[in-house]
Amino acid sequence: MQRRTFLQFAAANAALIVLPSTTTYGKSLSWANYNKAIVIDGLSGIFSGKTETLTASQLATIKNSGITAINATVPYPGMNFEQTKKRIELTKRVVSKYPSALSLITSTDDILVAKKEKQVGVILGFQSTEMFADDLTRIKYFADNGVRYMQMTYNNKSQFGDGGLVKRNNGLTTLGINALAEIEANKVLVDLSHSGQQTVADAVAASTRPLTISHTGCNSIYRHPRNNDDQELRAVANKGGVVGIYLMPFLEGGNGVITAESVMKHLDYAINLCGEDHVAIGSDQGVIPVKDGPKYREMIRKDVEIRMAKGISAPGETPNRPPFVPELNSERRMELIAFHMQKRGHSSSTIEKVLGLNLFNLYKQVW
């Protein structure tokens, strides 16, 4: 088994490795409407991509999640065109191998079918741009092959624009502006996660369709390069887009574990700022919960070292503060989030929107 590396794959999808579920959090903390709702995680993962075989236990955990669909990052950052093609092919083979548990999502109709059949729908997404190089015809190629999320940059500078860790942010390049137009022309959702401020501003100004910041936090709650300022969050919302709150260590300072309360603070703030129609969850976690322990911490330590050596490690990445929220470390984490929202006084209508309906409506507009 291999955990999807903490930094080869997005700033932290901590549980891409397939591990047995040991948590009991989801058994008593529930939300009455969960099983009826369309539940979409705007950034997640299911399997490692190193094997095409899932065990009966793993499949049962996936089905028990109650998640209708996820945006699953397919290639690791740094993968080129050919490597990305192979990853897409492998992902499709795994999905088709287990039709009782998984389905491929390319349209909102597919999401409705997945809900009816009690499958977890897999949406193919990118978090980096190396697979395109300077050839924008590849955007159509990947769109035709089912990719529905494309991100403009990772933490550093890409050929399309500057990421959130770039100190002198110059925004989108000319190629990036053309790429954004091509992505929109192919009815793929533009993702501005990991982007610098000027890149976000340029993309919103150039876009003709709604966009997303699939996984982020609010700088007004805790300032961090992976979080976004009010003006960025509001600009995406005003364009008709959706911002997703993640379950990452970047939500607060210090060395303690991230709590559900911290997640709720960011979620409440985003709802008040952007409106309840423009906020979602992009957990940046795997569907199967993390099995914490010495081996897991050692994998995290090695991953952080690699990321630091590559210059893509965000502040706060440390094995002493692993990238998940213990209180929400369950395949039923979306239901736990709904429970905490209800506890804070959010209506069932608002909870339903945040858990998936907002992303579903965004997909209808863009796809």
Image (cartoon, helix red, strand yellow):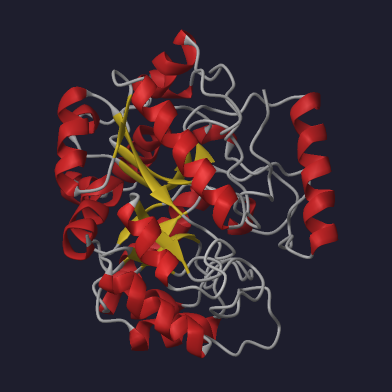
The percent coordinates of residue 51 (x first, y second) are 57, 25
The percent coordinates of residue 70 (x first, y second) are 37, 42
Which quarter of the image is occupied by the N terminus?
top right
In the picture as drawn, the residue positioned furthest to the top comes out as 56
Give left or right: position of 192 versus 297.
left
Above or below, 66 relative to 123: above
Above or below, 181 relative to 250: below
| Residue 319 visible in the displayed image | no
Residue 149's quadrant in the figure? Answer: bottom left
Residue 166's quadrant in the figure? Answer: bottom right
Above or below, 88 relative to 46: below
The percent coordinates of residue 241 (x first, y second) are 29, 69
Residue drawn at x 40%, y 14% as measured from the top left = 60
Give left or right: position of 22 versus 208.
right
| Residue 204 visible in the displayed image | yes
Residue drawn at x 23%, y 72% as measured from the top left = 240
Query: Residue 242 or 207: which is nearer the viewer?
Result: 207
Which quarter of the image is occupied by the C terminus?
bottom left
Query: Residue 340 or 1: which is nearer the viewer?
Result: 1
Residue drawn at x 32%, y 33% as measured from the top left = 67
Give left or right: position of 243 versus 17.
left
Above or below, 115 relative to 124: above
Tally of marks = 0
The percent coordinates of residue 303 (x first, y second) are 77, 45
Query: Residue 345 or 364: which is nearer the viewer?
Result: 364
Query: Residue 226 or 131: which is nearer the viewer?
Result: 131
